[in-house]
Image (cartoon, grey):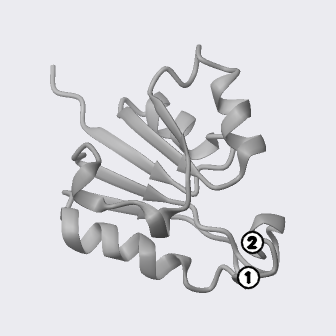
Amino acid sequence: MYKPTAKGYFSGCGGMEIGMMKAGVNVIQSLDLDPEATTCMGANKHYFAHSVLNADIKDKTVLDQPKSDIIIGTYPCTKYSPIADIHGTRTGDDLFLHFFRHIAIEQPEMYVVENVRV
């Protein structure tokens, strides 16, 4: 039986990925800049047996990552997320541009974007 594959960006501690897995999606990669979030995912291998990357999306080359059917983005909102102000150097406002760079280059079958109301 076919199971679509997905990658998550700005994964936090993996809530959206867990929801996608419960819906029958095979999550193959999660990425987040926050080391506490990725450490949490790494400590819960019974949920996150896939690759969990502690990295900045702006530094990730799209074609060097595994291809997936779905790309999930839960980028941080500057008003509600402490990680959005990344060491005082970025506001988080440009993160959606990096996310959509991945969409434009990889061209998955679909993408999912979640964010809080501003």
Determine the residue positioned at 39% across, 46% down: 7
Q: Position of residue 91 (x, y in %)?
A: 71, 84
Determine the residue positioned at 54% across, 76% down: 95
User: Dividing the picture into quarters, in which one does residue 92 lie?
Assistant: bottom right
User: Residue tagged by mark 2?
Assistant: 86
Is 102 on the left or on the right of 113, as rendered? left
Q: Say if mark 1 contacts mark 2, CB within 8 Å.
A: yes
Determine the residue positioned at 59% across, 67% down: 75
Question: For this rendering, which residue is in front, 64 or 14?
Answer: 64
Q: Neighbour class for label 1 at 10 Å: few (<14), some, many (≥20)?
A: few
Question: For this rendering, which residue is in front, 35 or 15?
Answer: 35
Name the disc covering residue 89, or none.
1
Q: Amino acid at mark 1?
A: Thr
Q: Amino acid at mark 2?
A: Ile
Q: Is residue 19 above or below residue 89?
A: above
Distance from disc 1 to disc 2, alpha carbons, whole Å, reads: 6 Å
Q: Position of residue 73 (x, y in %)?
A: 49, 61
Q: Is residue 39 above or below residue 71?
A: above
Name the disc covering residue 44, or none.
none
* Element type where label 1 sits in the image: loop
User: Dividing the picture into quarters, in which one does residue 87 lie?
Assistant: bottom right
Q: Position of residue 54 (x, y in %)?
A: 59, 46
If the image is split into quadrants, where does the N terminus sit?
top left
* Element type where label 2 sits in the image: loop
